[in-house]
Amino acid sequence: MIKYLINRILLMVLTLFVLATLMFFMFRMLPGDPTMTVISSALNPKAQEEMKRQYGLDKPLHEQYAAYLRNIVCLDFGYSFQHNRKVSDMISGRLLNTILLILPSMIAAYALGVVGGALIAWKRGGKLEIGTVIVSTAFQSAPVFWLSMLAIFVFSVHLDLFPLGHIVSPGMHHGKSQWAIYFSLDFLHHLALPFIVNTLYNLCFPLLLMRSSMLETLGEDYVELCRMKGLPERKIIYNHAMRNSFLPIATTLPLILGWAVAGSVVIETVFSWPGLGLLMVEAVQRSDYPLVQACFLLIAVLTIVGNFVADLLYGILDPRIVYE
Amino acid sequence: MLGDFLRFIARSKLGMFGLILFAACVLVAVFAPVLAPYEPMQKHYDVSGKLMKLRPPSQEHLLGTTILGRDVFSQLIWGGRPALVIGLLTAMGVVLIGVNIGLIAGYYGGWIDNLLMRITDIFMGLPFLPFIIVVLSLTGRSLWTIILALVIIMWRSTARVIRSQVLSLRERSFVDAARVSGASSLKIIYVEIAPNIFPVALVNVVFALAWAIITEASIGFLGFGDPNVLSWGSIIYEAFASEMSYKAWWWVIPPGAAIMILVTAVYFIGRAYEEMINPRLKKW
Amino acid sequence: MALLSVENLNTVYRTQRGDVRAVEDVSFAIQEGLNLGLVGESACGKSTVLKSVIGVLPPNAFVAGGRILFKGRDLPAMDEEERRKLRWKEISMITQSALNSLDPVHKVGDQIVEALQIHASMDRTTAKQRVEEMFALVGIDSKRFREYPHQFSGGMRQRAIIAMSLILKPSLVIADEPTTSLDVIVQDQILKNVRKLQGMLGFSMLLVTHDMALVIENCDHVGVMYGGKIMELGPKREVILQPFHPYTMGLKNSFPNILDRRSELISIPGVPPVLMGELRGCRFFSRCPFGTEQCSTEIPPLIEVGPEHRAACHYTDRAEEMRNKAALAETWLNMARDR
């Protein structure tokens, strides 16, 4: 087990390192002045010179690279062109917003999807199964931004059940602390619709996959033996069938995380949810490169850490991996 | 082999349904110039010379008009082209690269396998939509850069799947027989093993196509699509950016529904084929 | 009263192409402490008989008629919940492919403890002890309690399966091709072990196999099945030494005789019938060298040919003659040519 853990940690560190390097070279491959991606051309020439020296941009490439890596570790991402603030100041709040939306909805989506898929597979046949498969397939085929817009259209505009977007009602939380805001009912009210849409959208994939997996597992010899052992059906499903069926799903967790993070960009745009994804999109639109880079790195870190956790989970679930 | 594929699909009701829908979408996209009543970018004015902006569906404009007075129905018909072109080219690219890498990694094993799998693992860490956006912001937005970015992100899962298939096939007796008879490695890989992984590769093509279409739509929606190309995603982008989208349901619903229908059709085809390969999933 | 008495059992599989009558009008009995071996080719219905007895048929299969009396109670007629309680406690099964019969994500010991907890409401410590005792009896190191199935070798897995099937001390143990996937030496060890345990725990065995030698070594009675029906049934000495059914005679020929090294193996040409739709006459007719018009239209009933010995053939009175002819290779080869 320890060996597996170390293996995964090394992989994580390696990936982060390769990613950072990739970013370094990508951003400097732009035609024209490579410093364009670090220092805003809107600054006056003297300030630009200052910054150049501060960020070591007049030094040879490998020194720049070393400095770059050092900066990342110290969480210094430079200055945003647009906002003229340190990028690192802007990001932390946004990061939390993204996590508060994506994490609960992914957990809910997975849990519901897995349980739903198992249920459907168990109660084979009939209209319920066919209907669920068709509806799930159609639902996950629809673009999530469109579904979000439809949801807003129906539930916010027409039925007036939820606000149109954003994270809190403007002006409502004057003077309150960060934490107070997050625990307020107003926040939850704004969270509700994007949370529901994201959950429903993301549960289709695990649901369909779990169903396929269960159908396969239920045909296995050891399940037949469990029946012969006289185990009650419920025990067979929970203890044996589901645990085995879940394994292929667990291997897709990293993939799902990739989707979730991608989805966050789109959902935040539609709901004007001030998270990392929306920040990145806005930054790209304004060619605010330091901000783009930082957002992307942070999103990537989230994904990679998520993958790591998923790998760990898989190691716990499948003894064949660990006890080689 | 394509004939087998079609015959398989035809046996499943769902697969047949998907195939027909897909064919319909392709036909509409191909015959867009004939089928669309107007030029998609043409602005329309009414009799009094006013721009017909945000008009609800009517007889002349079956799906109404956009905020710039353009006919939504014509845009809908033309919007399918980039989805299909990008989707199909991406799927082909993904499978080409993914299959080859999977074959090589699976067959040779050892350090080649290790290296290729590490690379795949690293790519797994890239959140794909943000990555694509960043790449596009640096390389500029055109049809080809989009396809390239999509392929870079998507080849990894195909490679993994093909590799594990090859690993199990490698031990089979027909491979030994080929080796003993003096066939070169390359020949074994491409003449003996490759045809056997074809079904799995085909399933991957289909699902890659579905993902590519959805991702392309998302890119278009965020405004990062090719600015010269009208796609379903970009139609919704325009609607959203105009901040009038919630008033003009005729503008927003059709392109999204079109994406949903096309992708659903592809998924149905993929599932039908998957069920054929793996019969335990059949027979609801 | 017999421990297990199967009377006119009919089991049907419902498929898209029609109903398959996998088991038709099968009757046999097993007395306490004695073993019955069912032999026959693949798809002759013997596995289906087992599954019907233990009550774990696939969803598209069902018992269409007849009775399965276990200690006097008709099993198919019982309420499913009651039957479930009987399963494993009274009737257990040693399965064929131990490779896939164990759940890969649970420890081997835990899977056996599970049976004890469900049926005997034992607490974990007592259960663990019992399992370790049983492991010792079957020849598995008790340390391996905590290991996973993939860490066991093929032979060990089979022993684990045997331990699991005997842990509740059932009265009847069904074995479905228990040693097919093992090499001969391990096969021998395992069966000797099972016989020893039988002596200690006193259960009866219903052994199903295509290997006649296995039956001869381990059983008291033999039943020969073909095409879903019983062709011959009786004490093993009688059936083997003096078969009354052509199929049994043919089977004898297919097994190597270690004493007579010059004798050739004679196989029965042809393939088993498809058990769907209209079926008339003896199931073996198409491959029987002695078949007549009557055989093709009338199903031969199981008639007594000796003490506890029955055969389903119209010409049991000419058994001696058939036996002599069946021992010759030409009888079978000529038939293949003529048909």
Image (cartoon, rainbow, N blue to C red):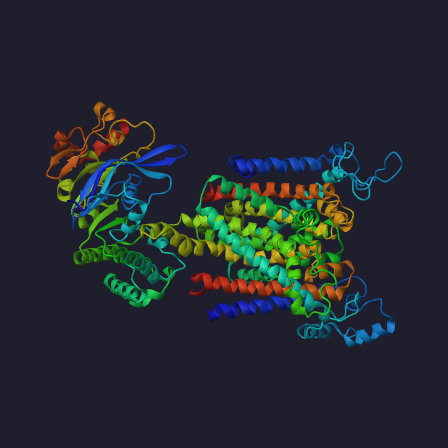
Spot occupied by residue A313 in the image (x, y as percentages of width and height) = 50, 63
Q: In the displayed structure, would residue B8 be above or below residue A319?
A: above
Image check: B110 left or right of B32? left
The quadrant of the rendering that contains the N terminus of chain B is: top right
Q: Residue furthest left?
A: C307
The answer to which of A207 and A154 lies nearer the viewer is A154
Q: Residue furthest top?
A: C293
Can residue B182 be seen here? The reply is no
The answer to whether residue C220 is seen in the rendering is yes
Image x and y of residue A90, in percent: 72, 68
Q: Could you tell me residue A251's position as x and y percent?
A: 52, 57
- Where does the image place residue A311, in percent across and percent down from the top left? 52, 63
Q: Is residue C189 above or below residue C324?
A: below
Residue depicted at x 40% and y 55%: A240
Number of marks in the image?
0
Residue sitting at 46 percent across and 47 percent down? A121
